[in-house]
Image: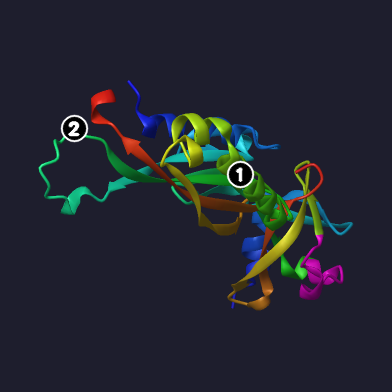
Amino acid sequence: MADVRENILARLVAVAASIPGIKSAQRDNVDITEEHLPVAMVFDGDEETNDAGDQSMRPAHRPTVVQMTPEITIIDMADLIGPALNIYRAELIKRVTTDTELNEQIVKTGRHGNGAIRYLGCDVGIAWVRERHGALHARFLFKYVLKPDEL
Amino acid sequence: MFDYSALLYDPIYDAIGVPATLDGASITVIDNTRAKVQPAGSTELHSVGPGAFARIPELAALGITRADYLDAVLTFNGRTWTVTNYDFRGSPNGEDLGEVQFFLKASSGG
């Protein structure tokens, strides 16, 4: 099975885990304690195609291009939470967009295929718990070829 | 009018209050540290919201006014905290005879 979607998400966990200072990287965990922090959480993203308007006679199992938009949330507690989150953000963007495995083997960007990886942006939430707490939600777009025959 | 300090607050602080120091001054507080769940996008972070109650008359007798509250260092129950904010809990005898609820953040030992 070659499910590009799953391969991307699994690789994102590994990439997030490699960020300096991150204690753990997890997938879709919606219930954590402060002992997990700083944590990077990869959330499975929505997936879309442009095939809704495709009325051609193309066989249903032929390859099509899909776009997935996963989100990676980084949560930490620190007095200077803003600068701390920005350091994580920079490392995250750099590591996701330059990761060799994602670019060359999974998504196949540039000379490796017609896939694409884009950083879409982020939003930040700040609050008080035991200390100042912040969460940065970074959104990415992955464009890749879905091949039903290979699933 | 009842004396709420003598009839209510003082007996309660005698029973469940704990020794504390606020910027070095000895006072009695009631530990108000409680569970706090903070949404972080799709995730919920379980932590605590540290806090404590103190009697305003006790603070005033020590010369501690509301201008001194913010950033004061409060030590009790083996931990040291910094006051980040506060709310007043007025008594029927008036705001100055009520309590102050300190909101805290972790400091050394926290």
Q: Quadrant of residue A94?
A: top right
Would residue B93 be found to the left or right of residue A42 on screen?
A: right
Is A98 covered by the magenta stretch? Answer: no
- Please tell me which of labels 1 and 2 falls first in the chain: 2
Would residue B49 be found to the left or right of residue B17 on screen?
A: left
Q: At which x and y percent is residue B43? A: 47, 45
Q: At which x and y percent is residue A20? A: 70, 37
Would residue A6 be found to the left or right of residue A18 on screen?
A: left
The residue depicted at 37 percent of the width and 34 percent of the height is A5
Query: Amino acid type of disc 1?
Result: Leu
* Cα gap from disc 1 to disc 2, whole angstroms: 35 Å
Q: Quadrant of residue B94?
A: bottom right
Residue under numbered circle 2: A61
| Chain of the residue on which disc 1 is drawn | A
Would residue B55 be found to the left or right of residue A149 on screen?
A: right
**Chain part drawn in magenta:** B59-72
User: How many numbered marks, from 0 up?
Assistant: 2
In the displayed image of the protein, which residue is found farthest to the right? Answer: B24
Q: Secondary structure at mark 2?
A: loop
Q: Which is nearer the eye, A37 or A92?
A: A92
Q: At which x and y percent is residue A6? A: 39, 30
Residue under numbered circle 1: A92
The residue depicted at 77 percent of the width and 47 percent of the height is B76
Which dot marks residue A108? none
Q: Label 1: few (<14), some or many (≥20) within 10 Å?
A: many
In the displayed image of the protein, which residue is found farthest to the top? Answer: A1
Query: Amino acid type of disc 2?
Result: His
| Chain of the residue on which disc 2 is drawn | A
